[in-house]
Amino acid sequence: MSYRLWILPFLSWGALAVSAPLTLSELKEKMTSRGIHWEAGSTSISKFSENEKRKLMGLQLDEGFQDVFKPASSRPTEKRLPTQFDWRNKEGVNYSSPMLNQANCGSCVAFSAIGALETQMNITQNTPHSPWAFSPQHLFSCGGGGCETGWHPLSAVQFLQKTGVPDETCFPYMSGGDGKDLACSQTCSDASNRSIKITSYSMPSFFMENPQAVKEALLKGPLMTTMVVFEDFIFYKGGIYKHVAGEQLGGHAITLVGWNDNDKAWIVRNSWGEDWGEKGYFRVAYGDSSGVSRQTWGIQVASSKGYVSLGDIRDHTVLSGVVKLDLKSTVDGTKNIELSVLKNGVPLLNETATNGARVSVDTKQFPDGVYTVSAIADTASGKVPSQPRTVYVLNGTFQGKVEFKNMTENETITENKEIEIGTSGSPVPFTSVAFKAVNLKTGEENVRATYTVLPKMIMLWRAQYLENGDYRVLMEAKVGDKVTVQSKAFNVKVSH
């Protein structure tokens, strides 16, 4: 068994919050009255001061975190998903890495990322004994996080891809002891030589409540995700958590490792040590107001035999004109690399280049549409492909529209509204959709966006958090930075 030693926080009781904190007895009364049955009790952090509890919430929440889109109906899929899945028990093998404890610092994003990275390494390298121990202190201190200010998951995965992270011994975790930040200059002098980089990352959901897409991504590895922590979550000891009562304490980053449809719950890894929850893990009901799974990030790492890549190209990249692709292979004995472009599984281009070459491709030779691109290394041991990428080619005209399905002129909105949205695009789909509400008096613009675009979507607009007044609302859909299409605008009144 692997063990990781983490410094426990110093307890210092601060001033009382303005409103009285939720007590365990009050929570249990509310749970009984509402028929909610997860196990609540005293935990390793429930006796912390309010200030100490809030310091555990190191996620920089995106504006409008709880304004989410969701599919209007389940989309068809060729994949038959299991009713339950857990990386702690995949065909009898536990691929999860040892539980960590962020302690007295808002470094949850770094711990979510390291937990995902170490587990993904175990999966990719087939090392369930988990020999990996990467430095959350280096990731946090050198990536731009702060104990008081927190950090963002997108910054973490981008740092992991561009710079990487060294082993824990290079820069041991110390910020959890006193909540103080450490300078990046305190890391080991050869950190760059000891660092591992992820090859790519994905965002299966972004402001999108889409369990199917998240489950499909989870089959490949754990996912970083985010949540709002309410006061009742601090008392969680076991069962399927569902928010009952209490104020928001802040944003938190955690790691999805599985699901169970029988329980209608996600399985999540926390970073508060094994003494909290179900040995550091918790289960949370699908669709809970805490927001687990609405924003997710998956990471990919190189296999032990090396990897083949197309450079920085990602899924749903919009290509036009002449583009340059960097073909690279780290597989031993690579002779050359073949660039492959397919349309509906039919090869349209096969071009051979030397390893490390930058290949120019004129996309105008292909009709506008959706293509699959991959690089295939010819090695001494055979053909080794890269992860395929779905890309959009757009050189000509685009026809598309985005529209409200249930908005009326001069409508009055008192609390929240489920907005029905329709989109259509040809010869490629939209890559992003944004909802915009402009205060007609102040000019202030309120924006909610998603990069998961479906023909039919529903967005929950929590208008009760806006100032009362008259607003102009519209939808704006884009195809990369090539095309922008706006819906019909409506004037509405917010009154709560």
Image (tube, helix red, strand yellow):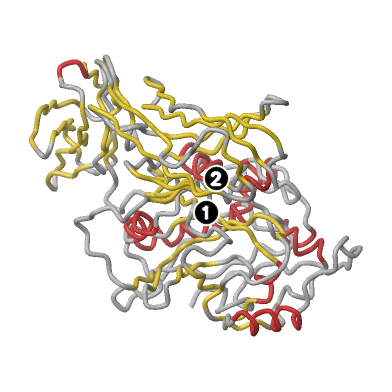
Q: Is residue 309 left or right of residue 147?
A: left
Q: Amino acid at mark 1?
A: Ala
Q: In 3D space, how far apart are the residues under numbered discs 2 and 1 (Cα atoms)?
A: 7 Å
Q: Residue at x 72, y 82 (%)?
A: 42
Q: Residue at x 20, y 36 (%)?
A: 372
Q: Which residue is mark 2?
A: 156
Q: Is residue 368 above or below residue 69?
A: above
Q: Is residue 271 above or below residue 154?
A: below
Q: Is residue 334 left or right of residue 92?
A: left
Tell me, yes or no, whether the two marked residues, 2 and 1, touch with CB atoms within 8 Å.
yes
Residue 325 spot, x, y in % from top left: 29, 25
Label 2 Cα neighbours within 10 Å, binned few <14 / some 14-19 / many ≥20: many
Q: Is residue 105 above or below residue 207?
A: below
Q: Is residue 174 left or right of residue 116?
A: right
Using the image, tell me which numbered label, if any, was put on residue 246.
none
Q: Is residue 439 above or below residue 121?
A: above
Asked whether 8 or 416 is in front, the reply is 416
Q: Which residue is mark 1?
A: 113
Asked whether 32 or 368 is in front, the reply is 32
Residue 122 spot, x, y in % from top left: 38, 63
- Find numbered disc 1 in the image and state the secondary structure of the residue it sits on: helix
Residue 85 spot, x, y in % from top left: 35, 71
Q: Earlier in the sequence, mark 2 or mark 1?
A: 1
